[in-house]
């Protein structure tokens, strides 16, 4: 399967293969646990799931374990980035175990933020 042109990208059909074709395009997600914006490795995603829609994947923060609710696809410019598409995630394989892990990770993050005196 070949990469689609950017004009054909929709939130339900963008794949890692589409993104890897352009080195200036990248994915970010906002981590609710760490409260930072993280970048996802598109090459790592494409190595296994090149033709799966990004919308159907689970993105999990490697530091705190919280799952992302949406991702942003952006294009790198010299000093800034241009937003291309925001995708609300709807994972294909989401079960009670994932929901439990997500709740526990959020609870740990809230406890850590409360201990620091921030909210």
Image: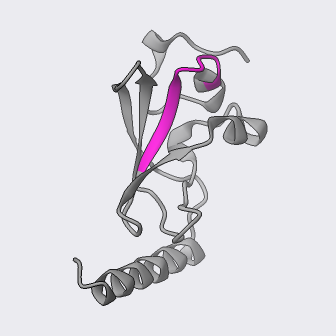
Q: Residue furthest front?
A: 79
Rendered residue at 56%/44% (across/down): 40
Q: How is the image coloured?
A: one colour
Q: Residue 43's spot in the image, x, y percent? A: 69, 35
Rendered residue at 48%/73% (across/down): 102
- The quarter of the image holding the C terminus is bottom left
| Image: 14 above or below 62 | above
Residue 106 in the figure: left or right of residue 55: left
| Image: 71 above or below 113 | above
Residue 41 in the figure: left or right of residue 8: right
| Image: 108 above or below 81 | below
Q: Residue 105's spot in the image, x, y percent? A: 48, 78
Q: Residue 7's spot in the image, x, y percent? A: 43, 10
| Image: 26 above or below 3 | below
Q: Residue 77's spot in the image, x, y percent? A: 41, 19
The answer to whether residue 21 shows anywhere in this view is yes
Residue 89 in the figure: left or right of residue 60: left
- Which one is nearer the viewer's eye here, 46 or 40? 40
Locate residue 79: give its quadrant.
top left
Read off the magenta span: 20-29
């Amino acid at each position: 399967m070949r990469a689609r042109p950017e004009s054909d990208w929709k939130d339900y059909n963008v794949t890692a293969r589409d993104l890897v074709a352009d080195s200036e395009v990248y994915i970010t997600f906002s981590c609710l646990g760490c409260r930072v914006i993280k970048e996802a490795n598109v090459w790592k995603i494409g190595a296994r799931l090149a033709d799966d829609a990004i919308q159907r994947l689970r993105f999990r923060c490697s530091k705190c374990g919280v799952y992302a609710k949406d991702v942003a696809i952006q294009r790198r410019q010299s000093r800034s980035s241009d937003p291309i598409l925001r995708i609300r995630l709807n994972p294909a394989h989401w079960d009670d175990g994932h929901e439990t892990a997500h709740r526990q990770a959020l609870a740990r993050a809230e406890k850590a933020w409360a201990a620091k005196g921030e909210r």
